[in-house]
C-alpha cells in the first residue's frame, strides 16, 4: 500500500488532457501498488479541486466519490466518516468539507455549532444566534 496526495488521486480519477504524462504515471504507480491510502484531508481537497479547477457538476463529483468509496483499491482514512459525509453531501446543499466536519462531530457525539445556514439544515448542526 502507498499513500497519495490530492494531485496523485486526481490524476488517477480524471483524464486531464493537459497532464497526460502525470495521468499515466499515477495510474501505473497505482496499478503496481494495488492499494492506495487516502487521508481524510485529501478526500476533502479532491472535491475542492474537482469543483474549482475542473468545474465539475455535483452529480459527477458524487459519482467519483462513490467510486472512491466502493473501489477496494482505495483505503479511506475514517471510511465511516467519509460515508456519512457523502450521504449528507448528496442529500443537501452543504459543501463536502462541511459534511466531513459534521460527520466527525457526530461520531464524537457532540452538536456542531455554525453560522453556515446550509449546514444547519442537516441533523446535528445548530445555528449560532446573533
Image (spheres, rainbow, N blue to C red):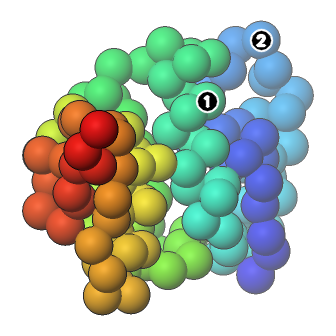
Q: Position of residue 122 (x, y in %)?
A: 15, 53
Q: CA distance from mark 2 to mark 1?
A: 15 Å
Q: Position of residue 65 (x, y in %)?
A: 39, 50
Provide the residue designation for mark 1: 49
**Whether residue 94 can be seen here:** no
Q: Secondary structure at mark 1?
A: helix
Q: Position of residue 1 (x, y in %)?
A: 76, 81
Q: Quadrant of the C terminus?
A: top left
Q: Residue at x 40, y 67 (%)?
A: 82
Of 46 and 72, nearer the camera is: 46
Q: Position of residue 93 (x, y in %)?
A: 21, 33
In the rendered structure, find residue 22 and report the number of the disc placed on it. none
**Whether residue 101 can be seen here:** yes
Of 107 and 14, nearer the camera is: 107
Q: Decide if residue 24 is on the left or right side of residue 123.
A: right
Provide the residue designation for mark 2: 18
Of 87 and 68, nearer the camera is: 87
Residue furthest out toward the front: 130
Vertical side of 76 occupied by 90: above or below: above
Vertical side of 89 occupied by 35: above or below: below
Disc 2 packing (10 Å; few <14; some 14–19; many ≥20): few
Q: Nearer the viewer, mark 2 or mark 1?
A: 1
Q: Please identify the quarter of the rendering in which residue 11 is found.
A: top right
Disc 1 packing (10 Å; few <14; some 14–19; many ≥20): some
Q: Decide if residue 107 is on the left or right side of residue 117.
A: right
Q: Are marks 2 and 1 in contact (CB under 8 Å)?
A: no
Q: Decide if residue 43 is on the left or right side of residue 82.
A: right
Vertical side of 79 occupied by 41: above or below: above
Vertical side of 83 occupied by 48: above or below: above
Amino acid at each position: 500500500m502507498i499513500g497519495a496526495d490530492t494531485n496523485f488521486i486526481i490524476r488517477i480519477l480524471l483524464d486531464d488532457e493537459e497532464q497526460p504524462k502525470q495521468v499515466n504515471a499515477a495510474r501505473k504507480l497505482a496499478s503496481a501498488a494495488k492499494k492506495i491510502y487516502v487521508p481524510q484531508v485529501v478526500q476533502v481537497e479532491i472535491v475542492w479541486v474537482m469543483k474549482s479547477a475542473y468545474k465539475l457538476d455535483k452529480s459527477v463529483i458524487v459519482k467519483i466519490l462513490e467510486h472512491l468509496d466502493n473501489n477496494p483499491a482505495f483505503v479511506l482514512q475514517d471510511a465511516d466518516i467519509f460515508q456519512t459525509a457523502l450521504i449528507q453531501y448528496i442529500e443537501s446543499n452543504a459543501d463536502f468539507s462541511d459534511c466531513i466536519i459534521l460527520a466527525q462531530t457526530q461520531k464524537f457525539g457532540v452538536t456542531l455549532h455554525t453560522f453556515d445556514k446550509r449546514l444547519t439544515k442537516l441533523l446535528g448542526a445548530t445555528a449560532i444566534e446573533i
